[in-house]
Amino acid sequence: MQKLLQGVVAALFMLLAIGLVQAEEAYRQVQPLLHTAQSVLGEPLLLADGTALQITSTIVTIAPGEKTAWHKHGVPLYAYILSGAVTIDYGEQGTRCFTPGMAFMEAMDHWHRGTNQGEEPVRILAVYLGTEKSQLVIPKP
């Protein structure tokens, strides 16, 4: 039983690593927080239509003067600015600046990149709402 549990834990960490590799292609510094398909009581996370939901949360840090790679998202992404100010360039859709305490749902179908034009690191709580096979971050070719 213990070996089975160890195997399940190893598999979960591998899935988390795959999602974070995608994120790290766009962001240089990513701190994993949670990657789960279950509630704290072990209940499966399901949408109303029965689709299994996978939640992945991270803290993305953007150093002063740093820019992320151009990317988009394959799933809805809730973002909350913990510290610093990030300016996000959405190409033809313009730019937007987000400051501490601001929360937003990030664009999915538009290439974008974040820039830290300030003097302190930007820290963003990123919560991805996907499925087991979702591509969280899609780097621009």
Image (spheres, rainbow, N blue to C red):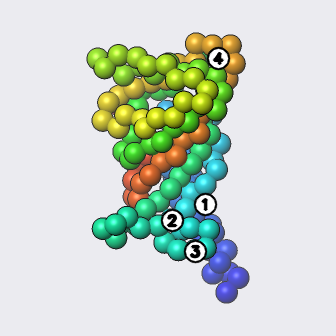
Q: Helix or strand or loop: what does disc 2 sit on?
A: loop
Between 9 and 109, the one lying in front of the other is 109
Q: Which residue is mark 1?
A: 13
The residue carrying pointer 4 sits among few (fewer than 14), some (14 to 19) or many (20 or more) residues within 10 Å by Cα, namely: some
> Looking at the image, is mark 1 or mark 3 earlier in the sequence?
1
Q: Which residue is mark 4?
A: 64
Look at the image and tell me in which quarter the C terminus lies: top left
Mark 4 to mark 3 CA distance (whole Å): 40 Å
Task: State which mark lies toward you, 1 or 3.
Answer: 3
The image quarter containing residue 73 is top left
Question: Picture coordinates of residue 125 (x, y %)?
Answer: 59, 39
> Looking at the image, is mark 4 or mark 3 earlier in the sequence?
3
Q: Helix or strand or loop: what does disc 3 sit on?
A: loop
x 35%, y 28%: residue:
111
Label of residue 37 in the image: 2
x 66%, y 27%: residue:
83
Q: Amino acid at mark 3?
A: Gly
Mark 4 to mark 1 CA distance (whole Å): 30 Å
The residue carrying pointer 1 sits among few (fewer than 14), some (14 to 19) or many (20 or more) residues within 10 Å by Cα, namely: few
Mark 2 to mark 1 CA distance (whole Å): 13 Å
Mark 1 to mark 3 CA distance (whole Å): 17 Å
Q: Amino acid at mark 4?
A: Pro
Question: Picture coordinates of residue 107 (x, y %)?
Answer: 37, 34
Task: State which mark lies toward you, 4 or 3.
Answer: 3
**Tags 2 and 4 touching, CB below 8 Å:** no
Task: State which mark lies toward you, 2 or 1.
Answer: 2
Q: Which residue is mark 3?
A: 42
> Looking at the image, is mark 2 or mark 1 earlier in the sequence?
1
Q: Amino acid at mark 1?
A: Phe
